[in-house]
Image: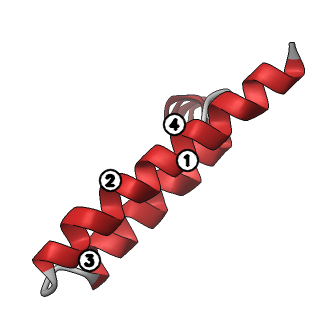
Amino acid sequence: MKKALRAFGAFWWDFLVGDTPEFFVAALVVVALAFLLHTHRVLGAIVLPVFVLVVVALSAVRVRRRR
């Protein structure tokens, strides 16, 4: 049973986090921002895509520096 639970946890860790934990954290932040801004639709429509673009750009810069 313990081995099965460990394998199940490892699967979800690899599935959700994988090689880029910053995307997992960013996804949690996007969900939290969407929840907080659900009454301010215009602000949410601006803030959420900008946040996602910044996270993707920073990740691309980070990967580029590795090479």
**In the image, what residue occupies the spot 46% across and 60% down?**
28
**Between marks 3 and 2 in the image, the one whose residue lies nearer the viewer:** 2
Residue to which mark 2 is pinned: 49
Identify residue type, mark 1.
Answer: Val
Is residue 42 depicted above or below 26 in this figure?
A: below
Please say whether residue 32 is visible from this viewpoint: yes
- Between 57 and 31, the one nearer to me in the picture: 57
Secondary structure under the numbered disc 1 in the rendered image: helix
Quadrant of the drawing holding the N terminus: top right
Sequence-first tag of 1 and 4 = 4
Q: Position of residue 10 (x, y in %)?
A: 63, 33
Q: Are marks 1 and 4 in contact (CB under 8 Å)?
A: no
Sequence-first tag of 1 and 3 = 3
Residue 42 picture quarter: bottom left
Identify residue type, mark 2.
Answer: Pro
Q: Position of residue 37 (x, y in %)?
A: 24, 81
Q: Position of residue 32 (x, y in %)?
A: 38, 73
Sequence-first tag of 3 and 2 = 3
Identify residue type, mark 4.
Answer: Trp
User: For the residue carrying disc 3, how many other residues have a C-alpha within 10 Å: few (<14), some (14-19), or many (20+)?
Assistant: few
Residue to which mark 4 is pinned: 12
Q: Position of residue 18 (x, y in %)?
A: 61, 29
